[in-house]
Image (cartoon, grey):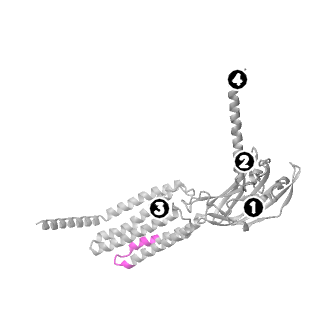
Amino acid sequence: MARSPAVLALLLICRAQEWDHLFDESTQAVDRRMQALPDGFEINETLNGSIPLTVIPSWDVFLAFSDREKFIKGRMSIATIYGEEATTFVTNPENMVDVVNFGSGSGDISVLSSLRLWDPKTGKQATSVSKTYVGQFSQSLYSYDLSCYPFDVKTMHFEIALQKPCGIFYRLVLGCAGEGSIPTIGQDGVVECSWPINASYVNFDWDYFTCKLQNSATITCAMTGTRHWAALLKTYIWPSIIYGLMGFLAFTLGVKLAMPRVATTMLALLSLTNLRNQVIGLLPTTDSASWMEEYFLIAISFMLLNLLGHAASFHLDASGRHHTQKMMNKFNLWGVFSVFVLVVLVRLHTRNCPLIDPTISLTMTLLAAPVSLSIVLFLVWYHRQAFREATHKLTHSVASARGSFHDGNV
């Protein structure tokens, strides 16, 4: 079909605009790469990232882990394989591959001897060089949630990247080799590789070390671990339960034993505060408190209520309201304790922690709620005489106030 001159002119204009757009994008890409160079220097752009550097990462040894400093410490190895053409611009191309979040410094990076290989695809020799990183790998650049501590799962991240501006003529290729490696093949080769760890180190159970090819200049690796929460509970929670019971059992002592009652509660309060300070020393300072921090805050707050309960008991006994004083003792011993257990369970369930089955936490919460309510209602019924005493005392006080008011008016 013949086209009119106007249509042809319009097509030529559109094609010219498309070419201008592609030219602008190419120019901007070159400008971005050249921003890493000082003025007056240029790099040969003809290769356009065509020289491959095959990278095979591996996690070798666990050394330490810190929630407070947000790092995992260990040994990570990177094997870099490249052909002869890779040495055209750089004498040691393996030095252009770096782990971005390695924070221990160059002194803890070791380059091992090179190994000569044969590449049957190109019919040329290749070189393999391994580089080891032994030290701390920072996690401060990644999401680090401690709201469920110690019932949490942590994912450690590692970023392997080309130093700028090496992406102009190099490109990273992910290699998948080693015992138990599990590759994922895409259109351009390996796009993901996983190596099983299946071991327990630095208070975590780790499953796989997985690396993904993000782009021609970046490979991201990660491994996920499940925290050993039982050891932390034995170290901090179980002693806190004992101290908390001490604080509540002080109400079983006679009201005349004022000093032992207050001293026992104060000892529980100081012990809980000391445990909380130890937990804070393990965790970073953040706006959102972890479950364990919140647990100790709740326990310390209830110890304050116990001190107020002692003061109320001493006042009621001194004023001769013995029924009310006995009710106050029983209410603090059983009623407040049951409410404390309910609050702790509710806060644990609402956090939706990955290591806590929501069905179990919900069941425990639903069981604790009627138990707490039943205890409070039973105490109200059992000590109904105390309420009559309190009502009589209140009525007498109101009548005396009215009498004083009328006498004053007269």
Q: Indicate yes or no whether the magenta region holds residue 267.
A: no
Looking at the image, which residue sits at the far left? 410
Kindly identify the amino acid type of the residue bearing the numbered disc 1.
Answer: Ser
Q: CA distance from mark 2 to mark 1?
A: 32 Å
**Nearer the camera: disc 4 or disc 1:** 4
Image coordinates for residue 286, horizontal then vertical, percent: 53, 62
Residue matched to label 4:
5
| Residue for badge 1 | 77
- The x, y position of residue 196, in whole percent, is 71, 57
**Magenta residues (range):** 244-259
Q: Nearer the viewer, residue 116 or 46?
A: 46
* Quadrant of the drawing holding the N terminus: top right
Q: Quadrant of residue 407?
A: bottom left
Kind of residue indicated by mark 2: Val
Query: Which mark, by number, is residue 340?
Result: none
- Foreground disc of the pair 1, 3: 1
| Residue 256 position in % (x across, y down) | 34, 78
Q: Are marks 2 and 3 in contact (CB under 8 Å)?
A: no
Q: Is 328 in front, or is 211?
A: 211
Residue highlighted by disc 2: 30
Which comes sooner in the sequence, label 4 or label 2? 4
- Please name which of the two marks, 2 or 3, marks the residue nearer to the observer: 2
Residue 250 lies in the magenta-colored region: yes
* Contact (Cβ within 8 Å) of mark 4 with mark 1: no
Crowdedness near tag 1: few (<14), some (14–19) or many (≥20) residues, C-alpha within 10 Å: some
Q: Secondary structure at mark 4?
A: helix
Query: For the residue carrying disc 2, how many other residues have a C-alpha within 10 Å: few (<14), some (14-19), or many (20+)?
Result: few
Q: Which residue is mark 3?
A: 344
In the image, taking residue 215 as reference, residue 387 lies left or right, namely left
